[in-house]
Amino acid sequence: MIAYIKGYIAEIGKDYVIIETSGIGFKIIVPFSTLRELPHIGETIKLHTYLHIKDDGFQIYGFLTNNEIDVFEKLVAVNGVGPKAAVSILSTITLDELYTAIKTGDYKIIEKSPGVGRKTAQRIILELKDKLINDAYNINGDDSSSDVLNALLSLGYTKQESLSALSGIDCTDAENALKQALKKLMK
């Protein structure tokens, strides 16, 4: 498995980027969220990657953040959702919109994505409702995560604001996690 590719950007397409490293150009399919955050051609970048192997070849999918690739991997694990549909979802809606849609059961938000129908959107919600919300925000029921979340709630932040602020923060050190979350919320 290829965990990531680091190199310089040789080309940017409408749904891909070519990264050259050690004289090899890797064509990597990326969602729009990653595409719009890419630096300029010639600059160095590191993309977290997912290698999809199929009968007629293979394709590499890339993401700027661990959060994006984690969500992508959870989406492709849903029956009937392939890498193209998962990239379509991540290109059409933000991670926060996806979390909200799954949490509230609003399949219409997910259904906006090209190639994703109502049944597939409903299946995504059904299969990922518990798994995605908790995992994506590192809120897994352990005491330190719950303590940080409760501290933010007691300070008057909404649950959605608090969960978004905790996204990607390691909550094993509750005091440090709270400081990092408050910095995000103060921006």
Image: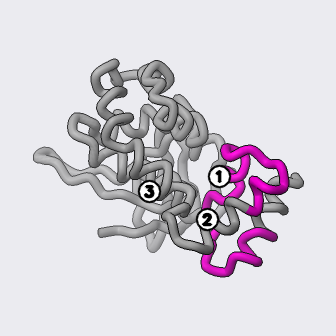
Q: Between tags 2 and 1, which lies in front? A: 2
Viewer-closest of 5 and 89: 89
Is 78 placed above or below 151 here? above
**60 displayed left or right of 102:** left
Q: Which residue is mark 2?
A: 146
Q: Which residue is mark 1?
A: 163
Distance between mark 2 and mark 1 Cα atoms:
11 Å
Badge 1: few (under 14), some or many (20 or more) residues near its Cα, within 10 Å? many
Is 145 placed above or below 31 here? below
* Magenta span includes 167: yes
Q: Which residues are magenta?
A: 151-179
Q: Is residue 147 visible?
A: yes
Q: Between tags 3 and 2, which lies in front? A: 2
Which kind of residue does numbered mark 3 sit on? Asp
Badge 3: few (under 14), some or many (20 or more) residues near its Cα, within 10 Å? some
In the image, residue 66 lies at what x, y percent? 52, 61
Outermost right residue: 186
In the image, residue 52 lies at what x, y percent? 26, 52
Q: Give me the residue at 67% from left, 50% from top.
A: 164
Distance between mark 3 and mark 1 Cα atoms:
16 Å
Residue 70 is marked as: 3
